[in-house]
Structure formats: C-alpha cells, structure tokens
Amino acid sequence: MLADVDFGVLKLDKSLVGALGSRTNYQAILKNLIRMCQDLVIEVVAEGVETHEQEAILRDLECKLGQGYLYGKPMPASEFERAYL
C-alpha cells in the first residue's frame, strides 16, 4: 500500500511536465499528486522543466522544486564548481 512506503521524495516524470499547458488532464493529475505528497510530507521534484510556462504552472500547483534545461544543462562537476561556487 502506498501509505506504508517510506520515501521522502517523489519525482514527477518529464513526460507529465512536458504535457503541461497542452493537456489539462495532466495538470489535474499533477495537482492531485502534489497535494497528496504535501499531506504525506513527501517532497516533490518536477523533472524536465524546459519552459517558463511549465515553471509557472508548477509554481501555481505549489511544486517548489524542479530540474531541467530551463535551469541549466548537464555539465561535469568541475565546470559546475567554476560556474556556481
């Protein structure tokens, strides 16, 4: 049963995030997943955030964490350290 599983983070697949804005049923699914995770004190991370529109929708749905090309492309750790630390 899902309530018995002990995990602290749920990642929203990029296929769901990528459909935001064009498929309203995906938005409803994400809204309820995020709400359920909040109730269970599970952190939610959206994968594959590529547009400002996706970011705005996720923010409206109270998804506080995201990853994707909108924020940065994959890079070696050494390059990340030079750029951001």
Image: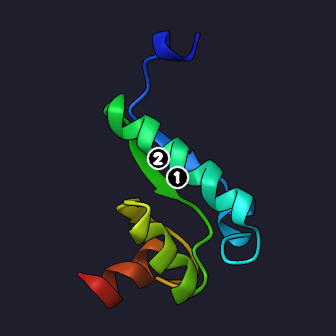
Q: Position of residue 9 (x, y in %)?
A: 43, 39
- The quarter of the rendered structure image containing the C terminus is bottom left
Towards the viewer: 41 or 21: 21
- Residue at 62% across, 61% down: 27
Q: Quadrant of residue 68?
A: bottom right
Q: Position of residue 13 (x, y in %)?
A: 66, 54
State the SS at label 1.
helix
Q: Position of residue 49 (x, y in %)?
A: 57, 74
On screen, residue 5 above or below 9: above
What residue is shown with label 1? 31
Hey, what amino acid is under mark 2? Answer: Ile
Crowd around label 1: few <14 · some 14–19 · many ≥20 (10 Å): some
What residue is shown with label 2? 34
On the picture, is 49 further left or further right than 78? right
Tell me the CA gap for discs 1 and 2. Answer: 5 Å
State the SS at label 2.
helix
On screen, residue 68 above or below 14: below
- Residue at 46% across, 82% down: 71
- Residue at 53% across, 44% down: 32
Do residues under tags 1 and 2 come within 8 Å of each other at their CB atoms? yes
Q: Answer whether residue 57 is visible to the viewer in this image.
A: yes
